[in-house]
Image: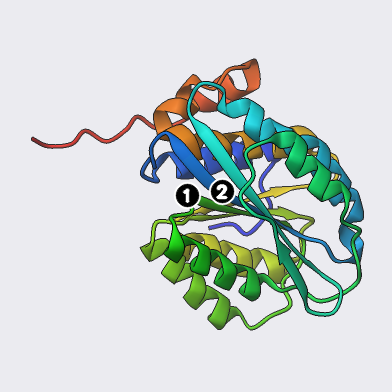
Amino acid sequence: MSNLPQPPSTAVAAFLRKVAEVPAPGAAGRLIFAMDATASRQPSWDRACHLQAEMFGAVGEVGSLAVSLAYFRGFREFAATPFLTQAQELARRMAGVTCLGGQTQITRLLRHALEETQRQRVHALVFIGDAFEEEVDAACHLAGQLGLRGTPVFCFQEGADPVARKALRQLTKLSGGAWAPFDAGSATALRDLLRAVAVFATGGRPALLRLGGAVAQGIAGQLPAPATRGG
């Protein structure tokens, strides 16, 4: 398999095909929306502040969505909000965060997600970042545990760092999630990805197929037909 980054449209289609394979959770979704908030991430953080409302807006009549914002920055600083049900409140929380230099804490994020889903199921973990600076085996072990508990990890990687790509793709594979690349100019691709995860977390594959808008319908048309179950 080629390791070359896929074009955004191809990556989004591949991501949605993977999402379609994950069992639908039902009408109420709980999602952890996590971002790398180290120094290089401020432009992406600002962009995500504007796009996060798409997750709530895309849900519509499919069901309800609760999102917990998690981030790491600085010297071992990690924070996570309660699960929020209003886009305005999530935006307010995000607007109060300034990115600070530091190393990644993705393993800590995965451990947090595991603790949360052990209390009450989390239907998806979304991570947006551009680097991986940790011991990969420990992170992979946690990702596998999340997969066993039905919490897929979806990683959206900005940039083309090969170390990050290899590690993040392993995490998504072990958890039953998916990886997709995007760049600083791919706001539309990121918006579609966030909308897709939110809709999946509330209504599963059927809701993805009903997702409105020309772009979403075009992507949904590339999804494989669901497998027929035997009687």
| Figure check: 204 above or below 209 | below
What residue does disc 2 label?
31
What residue does disc 1 label?
123
**Left or right: 9, with 15 as reference point:** right
**Dividing the image into 4 quarters, which one contains the C terminus?**
top left
The secondary structure type at the circle numbered 1 is loop
| Figure check: 227 above or below 216 | below
The location of residue 161, given as percent across then percent down, is 76, 65
Q: Residue 17: tell me if it is visible.
A: no
The location of residue 169, given as percent across then percent down, is 57, 62
Q: Earlier in the sequence, mark 1 or mark 2?
A: 2
The location of residue 93, given as percent across then percent down, is 80, 49
**Left or right: 88, with 153 as reference point:** right
> Along the line of sight, which residue is nearer the eye, 40 or 115?
115
> Along the line of sight, which residue is nearer the eye, 130 or 125?
125
- The amino acid type found where label 2 is placed reads Leu
**Left or right: 127, with 129 as reference point:** left
Query: What residue is shown at x 73% (from left), y 65% (from top)?
Result: 79
Q: Residue 210: tell me if it is visible.
A: yes
The secondary structure type at the circle numbered 2 is strand
Residues under numbered marks 1 and 2 in contact, where contact means CB atoms less than 8 Å apart: yes
Residue 204 image-quadrant placement = top left
